Image (cartoon, rainbow, N blue to C red):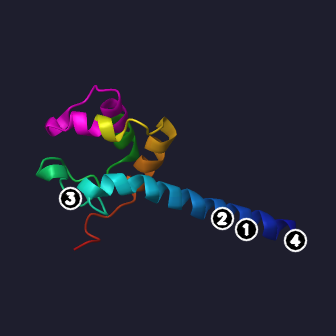
Amino acid sequence: MKRHLLLFIIITSTILTFADTLELYKNCAGCHGENGEKQALNKSKLIGGQEANVTIKELTAYKNGELDQYGLGNIMKLQLGIISQSDIEEIAEYVAKLDVNASK
């Protein structure tokens, strides 16, 4: 019985974490596409499948006003203003699993 309860808790928390991460990514999807398959404002690189450590580094730099790739620094800084470092890490892990070819 304890194993079943533990398994239920693990599955439920995994589903809820995924739902929260998906909710966080919705703001990104407006410019980058559902699967990271779009160039934001026709300027940026595709982010789908990008290594998580690269995404963490870039998002953190955007948030801190230290990065302005493609002239999108101010937009990204505003988007990331209320996002925590743990949220950035969750988004990065999510983005790494996206397939830019999934929408084609």
The reply to whether the magenta stretch includes residue 86 is: no
Which type of secondary structure does the marked residue at label 2 adopt? helix
What residue does disc 4 label? 1
Q: Residue at x 17, y 47 (%)?
A: 44
Q: Residue at x 32, y 30 (%)?
A: 61
Tell me where residue 98 appears, x and y as whole percent. Answer: 35, 61
Contact, CB < 8 Å: mark 3 with mark 4? Answer: no
Q: Residue 38 carries which label?
A: 3
Dot 4 or dot 1: first in sequence order is 4
What residue does disc 2 label? 12
Closest to the camera, between mark 3 and mark 4, is 3
Q: Residue at x 40, y 59 (%)?
A: 97
Which type of secondary structure does the marked residue at label 4 adopt? loop
Q: Which residue is drawn at 58% across and 64% down?
A: 15
Dot 1 or dot 3: first in sequence order is 1
Dot 3 or dot 4: first in sequence order is 4
Dot 2 or dot 4: first in sequence order is 4
Q: What stretch is highlighted in magenta?
A: 59-76
What residue does disc 1 label? 8
